[in-house]
Amino acid sequence: MVIGVLIEILEGILVNMTKYNEETRKIRKLAREFIPKLLEKEPLAAKIIVEKTGLQFPKNCDNSIKCECGQGSERPEWKHQILWAIQDCKYSKKIVFDSDKKNYHLTTE
């Protein structure tokens, strides 16, 4: 709970410091809420989580805004934001990565 609040605070601070506007970053917040619900059904690989989240929130997935974190990257920024949301969920202990099966599942604590 505390980690989730800290993530929200830091994200608010970073919005003013980042090259992407808040609308572009909104998919990350939506994905943080959606991913645990998605994983209630079955464990999924990151690629599938990104695809299903994109299908759930198509209005927040603008393919014209490209990720600028790597040289020559053609990946849309919304996919990058969903990958960050997966990490947010992992660090807040909502989900766990199974390195043997290469997928994420809900924490069983």
Image (cartoon, rainbow, N blue to C red):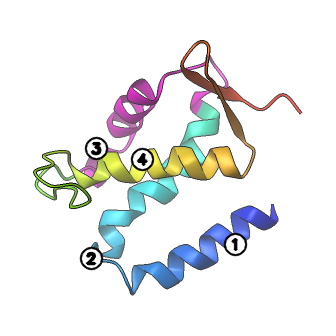
Could you say where residue 6 lies in the image, as x and y percent from the top left?
69, 72
- Describe residue 71's horizontal placement relative to residue 38 as left or right: left
Q: Is residue 63 magenta?
A: no
Q: CA distance from mark 4 to mark 1?
A: 18 Å
For residue 82, which numbered disc appears in the image? Answer: 4
Q: Residue at x 21, y 61 (%)?
A: 68
Q: Residues within 10 Å of mark 3 (few under 14, many from 20)?
A: few
Mark 4: give few (<14), some (14-19) or many (20+) Cα within 10 Å. Answer: many
Which residue is the site of mark 3? 58
The dominant secondary structure in magenta is helix
Place of residue 17 in the rendered image (x, y in percent of width and height, measured from the top left): 38, 85
In magenta, the rendered stretch is 38-61
What is the C-alpha distance between the residues marked 4 and 3?
A: 13 Å
Q: Secondary structure at mark 3?
A: helix
Instruction: Using the image, tell me which numbered label, if any, was put on residue 85.
Output: none
- The answer to whether the residue labelled 4 contacts the one labelled 1, judged by CB atoms less than 8 Å apart, is no
**Circle 2 residue:** 19
Separation of disc 2 and disc 3 at Cα? Answer: 22 Å
